[in-house]
Amino acid sequence: MKAIAKIRQLREEVGITQLELSQLVGVTETSIQNWERGRAGIEQIERVIKLCQALDCQPEDLIEYQKVSEEEIAQAQPKGRERLKKMRQLLGTDKLDHDSAVENKPDSHMEVK
């Protein structure tokens, strides 16, 4: 039995273009075209379906999203570390110890004279 993608049908029912779908999904428009024509990607979709059937779950159950700090994102990318360092220098926060900065921060309820 051959798998036939229903992506085009579903996309058209929703009323969006291939370009719009590609931007929503985070892939190229060519990827969407290939998926719709059955040229590529069907095997991966079939594997996800089988995985969900085996685990008795929905596709969204397979992934857990966790919040990532801006610093973690910057440190994951070499250029990001340098940009973060420059940004801190420009803001004058590069020499601050974040723990002591929080401790020394005046309380918002305190009166300033």
Image (tube, grey):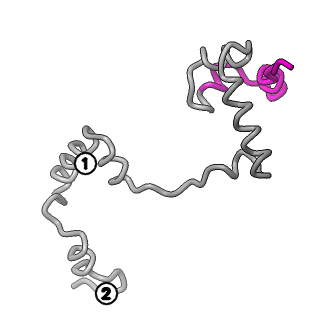
Residue 16 spot, x, y in % from top left: 73, 24
Q: Is residue 106 above or below residue 51?
A: below
Return the residue at label 2: 110
The residue depicted at 35 percent of the width and 53 percent of the height is: 72
16 is within the stretch colored magenta? yes
Q: Residues within 10 Å of mark 1 (few under 14, many from 20)?
A: some
Residue 77 spot, x, y in % from top left: 31, 41
- Would residue 83 appear left or right of 95 to someone viewing this image? right
Q: Is residue 9 above or below residue 109?
A: above
Query: From which residue to which does the magenta span run?
Result: 1-22
Return the residue at label 1: 84
Classify residue 91 by image quadrant.
bottom left
* Label 2 close to label 1 by CB (< 8 Å): no
Q: Disc 2 versus disc 1: distance between alpha carbons?
A: 32 Å
Q: Quadrant of the N terminus?
A: top right
Q: Quadrant of the C terminus?
A: bottom left
The residue depicted at 75 percent of the width and 45 percent of the height is: 52
Q: Earlier in the sequence, mark 2 or mark 1?
A: 1
Residue 43 spot, x, y in % from top left: 69, 25
| Foreground of the two, 104 or 80 | 80
Q: Which mark is residue 67?
A: none
Residue 9 spot, x, y in % from top left: 83, 21
Q: Amino acid at mark 1?
A: Leu
* Mark closer to the observer (2, 1): 1
